[in-house]
Image: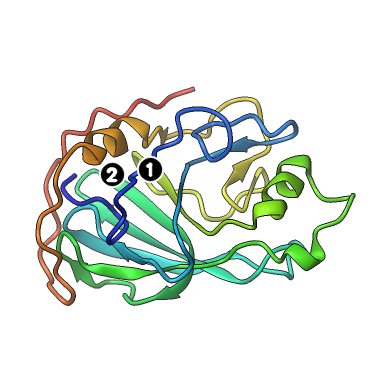
Amino acid sequence: MKIWPLKDDRKRAVPRSGPGSFWEDRVDRRHCGVDLYAPCGTVVLALEKGVVTRVGIATSPRKNRYWNTTRYVVVRHGTVFVKYAELGRVDVRKGENVAPGREIGEVGLVLNKNKIDSHSPLYIRKLGGRNPSMLHLEFFREKPITRHRLYLGGNWFGAKKPEGLLDPTPILSKLKRKKSAPRRKRGKGPVSGDLRMRASGGR
């Protein structure tokens, strides 16, 4: 991976435990990715060259009353699929080749704090007080999960990790220390080869 996924993000904070961290224990569910907190409207960039395999709805008030509508983009970066989620805007289409640093979209606002009440999950009530916006990232070895009876809004309602789910933390931590290359707004490129990632996964 070459590019930090948030434009002009000087803090590059990667949660290793607690809120927003990978496989965070949320009592009745587990967090499937890593949340990178950023102001709403922050430009989201492609981590590496690849091809867009899917675009869809990440959260919707039709599924949970305290959600706003946000979107996701799945990009195949070599042998790894990355889901860029909780986007307020999407700037790519399915089948499009993307270069490193290509603008994927913008960070959206996932929570509607006016709809959060005592019946909402505890972690949602805690987040609702700050109402943060974020980029939610999920890494998969193979086809990513977008619909499953145990999956909802970036959370997994099961004790064991879903097959192929990877921990993005090691890769993001390396990128945190790496200086970004110049950004390309509309650049395109072929599908990348093996990224030789060392993210951990499994059950």
Residue at the spot 53% in from the left edge and 40% down from the top edge: 20
Farthest right residue?
118
Task: Give the distance between the C-alpha atoms of the residues marked 2 and 1, in whole angstroms.
Answer: 7 Å
Residue at the spot 17% in from the left edge and 77% down from the top edge: 186
As rendered, which of 97 and 182 lies closer to the eye?
182
Q: Are marks 2 and 1 in contact (CB under 8 Å)?
A: yes
As rendered, which of 124 and 202 lies closer to the eye?
124
As rendered, which of 89 and 164 lies closer to the eye?
89
Quadrant (top left/top right/bottom left/bottom right) for the N terminus: top left
Q: Residues within 10 Å of mark 2 (few under 14, many from 20)?
A: many
Expressed as whole percent of the image width and height from the top left, the position of residue 170 reads 31, 30
Please state if 195 lies on the left or on the right of 71 as rendered. left
Q: Which residue, given by chain and number where applicable, does mark 1 sit on?
A: 139
Q: Is residue 34 above or below residue 180?
A: above
Label 2 or label 1, whichever comes before in sequence order:
2
As rendered, which of 17 and 199 lies closer to the eye?
17
Residue at the spot 71% in from the left edge and 52% down from the top edge: 129
Expressed as whole percent of the image width and height from the top left, the position of residue 159 reads 65, 25
The amino acid on which the numbered mark 2 sits, given as a three-letter code, is: Val
Per the image, label 2 sits on a secondary structure element best described as strand
Expressed as whole percent of the image width and height from the top left, the position of residue 198 reads 24, 28
Please state if 169 lies on the left or on the right of 4 as rendered. right
Please state if 119 lies on the left or on the right of 109 as rendered. right
Per the image, label 1 sits on a secondary structure element best described as strand
The amino acid on which the numbered mark 1 sits, given as a three-letter code, is: Phe
Q: Which residue, given by chain and number where applicable, does mark 2 sit on?
A: 80
Using the rendered view, name the quadrant where residue 99 is placed: bottom left
Residue at the spot 14% in from the left edge and 69% down from the top edge: 184
